[in-house]
Amino acid sequence: MRNVLMFMVDQLNYKCLGHRGHLDVKTPNLDALKKDSIDFTHAYVANAFCVPSRISCLTGLYPWMHREYGFHGLIDSDCPSMAQVFGRSGYTTALTGKAHVNPMGELLGFDHFIPTLPEDIIFSTDPGVNFKTYSEANGFVFPTDQNHGGDAFAPLKEKRTSLQRGAGTTIGLSHLPAAHSIERYTADKAMELIGQNKGKPFFIQVSFDRPHPPLSPSAPWADMYDPQSLTLDKPYTDEELSALPPHIQKAFKHSPFSIPSAGDRDFRTILAMYYGLISHIDDEIGRVISCLKEKGLYDNTILLFFADHGDMGGYNGMFNKYSNTIFHDNIIRTPLLLKLPDSANAGMETDSLCETIDIFPTLLNLCGISGPPLPGQNLMDLVNDPGVNKNHAAFSESYAIKTIIKDDWKLIYYVNGYTHELYNLKDDPGERKNIYPNFQNEESVNTARIIGLKQEIIKKMTPEVSEERKNFIRKIFSPVLQNAMEYMHKWDRNISGGGLWTICRDDYRLVVVPFDNICKLYRSDPQKAIPGINKGYIPYDDLPRMDALLNELINFIATSIRPVSLMSGSQGDWDAMLQTKGQGLV
């Protein structure tokens, strides 16, 4: 049986790696791992925030399926669990580092859980083995200035460095030496777990807390990069900024982590600390891989490397993740390396679209394990036949923002919002030119493209139905039963769910059948109408009308979901949930 080891990092920009051609960041161990791996260059996370994204990875479900858009509550007990499935299949399961998935509750399912995050400590499988007990035993106050949120607590406030950006964020040299750092502890515990292997296959998640802030590397990593020698990306121009939604304009102009607010010198310092953390994590990953090789386990171990989400990472003059309000590639795209047993397909790259929800079904396939039905694709299908899923679309969402990527085009849709974003990623990979504001004034091909992308959002958010149901719906549209729709809509009411969506508004009706990519607009014809029976709908060609009804349908589907929690968890967000106003509710 094959071993599985997953390296997960928090808030890593997918371009901040040596093998991605970054001009400054050094990641020699991940560069070496890439040579032994398949590199999925266009991978996307399910959510731009830690908890929902991590839960999506471990359950293989999109947020709208597990309904966790925030921090708290409990997801349904019938949700799939990667650790539980592997555990029931004879694997020893373990997680060392940052879980940050408390809403999974008992579904987390690891035999050994050695946490570093303060909120995870209570769930330690051995109460005496976690970063808290380790830090205190070595004379350090916990939470340390390397813990997520820990640097906001006294007495650590007094140990902050001179440059502070944002509440409770340390930027600069940590008071922890590298030997006692959170990165070293996470790697050491993973190596201990590997060393305890007695021939039973293992499933280990090595989850590094950073480069998520606090940006407080230990020496020598804090001094690895000279801030003044770094190469900076060009900030947004005024023209580019004017086409972006107001909340992004505001973030760029006023966020403490943007060039206009931080200034050149402080912005460089922020990036130097961020890069230092990345290089330290790379070093610890190298130690874990060396341990596998020393134990003779490397060839029979499946390795993965990815992030729960990204960070603006200095690009376009911005840094940080902006708490689920910006869905640009810098934040929702992740590096994804997959090393197979005996390094099969080593060095291969594929630019086929994929998602972190694909990891669960892929590992089940590679390990020969039967599991629950999952929406993700098997990544090995892309390896064996790159064209097998050429029509695939990637999807990332918050409760109020739905993002779809397909064929080099990307739509960021704000539920009940008045502005959206559209990018041609081939021509504009930095997402600096939002062309949505002008698409209706251009050729109809752009309007048709927008409509196609909105159909993909609906397809992603439509529950799967049985083949029996699909065949019945297909009959409705067959020539033999060409009037069937009229009888199903006798009173012109909307129909939702069951594999079929319709929106009736004024004298128009939109019909969407996602599994067959059907999207049809009809208009009533008084000459064909039968009073009291139907309105005599006939096919009608009106792209702007179709677009407006698609907006209404997406808004309906999105706000019909009852989430476990929202990101902020405030009562105001709950009260506003059914009146979502785009980026106003995240």
Image (tube, helix red, strand yellow):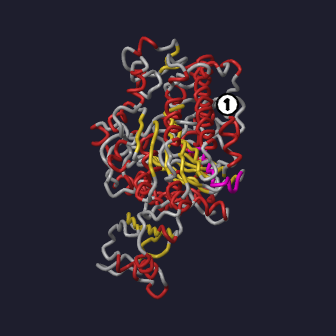
Front residue of 63 and 103: 103
Tell me where the magenta segment starts and ends, as one range: 333-346
Question: In which quadrant of the rendered view does residue 263 lie?
Answer: top right
Residue at (60%, 53%) from the top-left corner?
A: 300
Drawn side of residue 376 relative to residue 123, left or right: right
Q: Amino acid at mark 1?
A: Val
x and y percentages locating residue 406 in the rendered image: 60, 56
Residue situated furthest front in the rendering: 198
Tally the marks: 1
x and y percentages locating residue 576 in the rendered image: 31, 43
Q: Examine the structure image and report whether residue 470 is included in the region drawn in magenta.
A: no
User: Which quadrant is the N terminus positioned in?
Assistant: bottom right
Question: Could you tell me which secondary element the residue under label 1 belongs to?
Answer: loop
Instruction: For residue 289, say whether it is visible.
Output: yes
Residue at (62%, 28%) from the top-left corner?
A: 275
Above or below residue 522? Residue 399 is above
Above or below residue 336? Residue 513 is below
Pointer 1: residues within 10 angstroms few (<14), some, or many (20+)? many
x and y percentages locating residue 231 in the rendered image: 70, 26
Residue for badge 1: 25
Residue situated furthest bottom in the rendering: 480
Q: Examine the structure image and report whether residue 339 is included in the region drawn in magenta.
A: yes
Question: In which quadrant of the rendered view does residue 332 lie?
Answer: top right
Above or below residue 68? Residue 219 is above
Instruction: For residue 238, say whether it is visible.
Output: no
Drawn side of residue 71 relative to residue 404, left or right: left
Front residue of 283 and 532: 283
Residue at (54%, 29%) from the top-left corner?
A: 252
User: Which quadrant is the C terminus positioned in?
Assistant: top left
x and y percentages locating residue 495 in the rendered image: 35, 68
